[in-house]
Amino acid sequence: MTSRRLIGKRGLQVSPICLGGNVFGWTADEETSFAVLDAFVAAGGNFIDTANIYSAWVPGNAGGESEAIIGRWMAARGSRDDVVIATKVGMQGGPQQPKGLTRDKIRRGAEESLKRLNTDHIDIFYAHEDDEETPLSETMAAFDELVNEGTIGVVAASNYSAARLREALAASDEHGYARYELLQPHYNLMERSGYEGELAQLCVDEGITVAPYFALARGFLTGKYRRDQPLPATPRAAGIEKDYLNDRGYAVVDALDSVAKGHGARVGEVALAWLLAKPAVVAPIASATNVQQVTELAAAAGLALGAAEVSALDEASSVA
């Protein structure tokens, strides 16, 4: 992953694969998380994604565990200047991470994330989800303050509709505030309708780069789920069975198999390469719970698909 892609007006350089930190403190304990982070950097990766609520859904957790693990890892390795850290604010994650994008919640979220990450700045700070109860002018003003103070570098949005993203950009332009420069949508071969179309075109038109989350569809697009085979023993298996184990899902896996065979690649590598072939996509986000999975993520960064291969995957994953 020696190549770098650019985010924002400042030209923040990131690896073409972003390592998702949602598993740290959940399905990856601290020792395993350190090993995964070490392997990712050794493979040339530098882009790491987390959030203040990761992983509040785990019994006994309060949220912030992922940030704290990453913070301890950076301190142990002296690696802060070598990585680009993205975290988020505004989604409900227990009493310590309230929902909302008011000025006070954004500032408090930033302060608490800085402490857990053991750093004096956040490279990319996301609004984790839209807050329709707070004026967009207040939200963008709060982000702008943090940019001007040097606390954050790039302001980003996740889970925004095209209409609300357009309104947020207009509010920034009207008042001269920092704009959203990166979008994190739910987007992969199995989840296309929420991003493709108006939202994707808006990102292209406005110069907003895109880092899709659940890039491997919670593991479905790694090839672990096959016809007439038992479900893998993972926490996500039941949800994947419900959502993706159907004719369309199997057609996508068949198409991935065909393209992967032509490149001598793994199925998951092809699924990530498909995203990297899409306009505005800067780095798909995928998590790893062991070093072998990191190796597969790194391989995807160097896999270039031909136009016919992209079209074949488009067709297999299209929604009738």
Image (tube, helix red, strand yellow):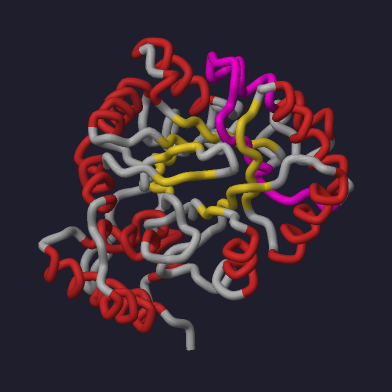
Front residue of 204/312: it is 204
Q: Residue 82: horizontal and vertical position, in percent?
A: 39, 24
Q: Which residues are magenta?
A: 110-132
Does 100 sit left or right of 220 as displayed? right
Residue at the image position 75 percent from the left and 35 percent from the top = 143
In the displayed structure, would residue 194 be above or below residue 82? below
In the displayed structure, would residue 29 be above or below residue 162? above
Q: Residue 166: horizontal and vertical position, in percent?
A: 75, 61
Residue at the image position 25 percent from the left and 43 percent from the top = 293
In the displayed structure, would residue 29 be above or below residue 237? above
Does 222 sit left or right of 115 as displayed? left
Residue at the image position 14 percent from the left and 65 percent from the top = 263
Residue at the image position 34 percent from the left and 80 percent from the top = 311
Query: Can I make out residue 247 in this image?
Result: no
Does 252 sit left or right of 265 as displayed? right
Name which quarter of the figure residue 226 lies in: bottom left
Please tell me whether residue 135 belongs to the stretch shown in magenta: no
